[in-house]
Amino acid sequence: MDEIKEDVRAYGRPAVLLYAGDYDASGEDISRDFIERTDCWDRVVRVALTSQQVIDFNLPQAVGKASDSRAAGFTARHGELVQVELDALPPDVLRDLLETALAEFWDESAYQRSVDREKVDREELFGVGGR
């Protein structure tokens, strides 16, 4: 966790966390716990799974674990105690959700500068054409 905080501080720019996890009491709490323990994010975006995605993609639901200490809070927020695994989403759907979320923050020109710089560095290290 300390490495994450150090990296965020070192770059000195807004830090954004894109998160995908199970739709259940634990899945929600993992993100809360991670955010709390790192305490370095300017923005957190839960990409998946949301209650609306469970409905939209007709994902299979199981009864949530009543023994989970977070079950009552989940039920209060969502009206029922359910459990839906992230891997219930088809891989192409999850990829599309992540790409869409990332697009808001992606800087193509910065990426291209990095690729160009990497090519120059490779040529300097290994000669023309790189490896």
Image: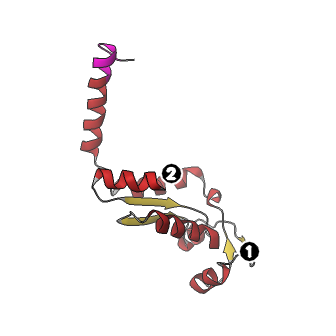
Is residue 65 rendered to the left or right of residue 74?
A: right
Name the secondary structure under disc 1.
loop
Q: Position of residue 126 (x, y in %)?
A: 34, 15
Task: Name the one closer to the observer, 15 or 37.
Answer: 37
Q: Position of residue 5 (x, y in %)?
A: 40, 56
Identify the residue at image location x=59%, y=72%: 55
Residue 114 found in image quarter: top left
Q: Position of residue 26 (x, y in %)?
A: 63, 69
Q: Position of residue 21 (x, y in %)?
A: 57, 62
Q: Is residue 111 magenta?
A: no
| Quadrant for the C terminus in the image | top left
Query: Which region shows up in magenta?
Result: 122-130
111 to 15, vertically: above or below: above
Q: Residues within 10 Å of mark 1 (few under 14, many from 20)?
A: some
Name the secondary structure under disc 2.
helix
Tag 2 near tag 1, CB within 8 Å: no
Q: Is residue 126 magenta?
A: yes
Nearer to us of marks 2 and 1 is 1
Identify the residue at image location x=64%, y=83%: 75
As shown in the figure, which amino acid type bears the numbered disc 1? Lys
Identify the residue at image location x=37%, y=66%: 43
100 to 27, vertically: above or below: above
Q: Residue furthest top?
A: 127
Residue 69 found in image quarter: bottom right
Where is mark 2, residue-wise?
95
Is residue 121 rendered to the left or right of residue 68?
A: left
As shown in the figure, which amino acid type bears the numbered disc 2? Arg
Q: CA distance from mark 2 to mark 1?
A: 28 Å
Where is mark 1, residue-wise?
65
Is residue 44 rendered to the left or right of residue 9?
A: right
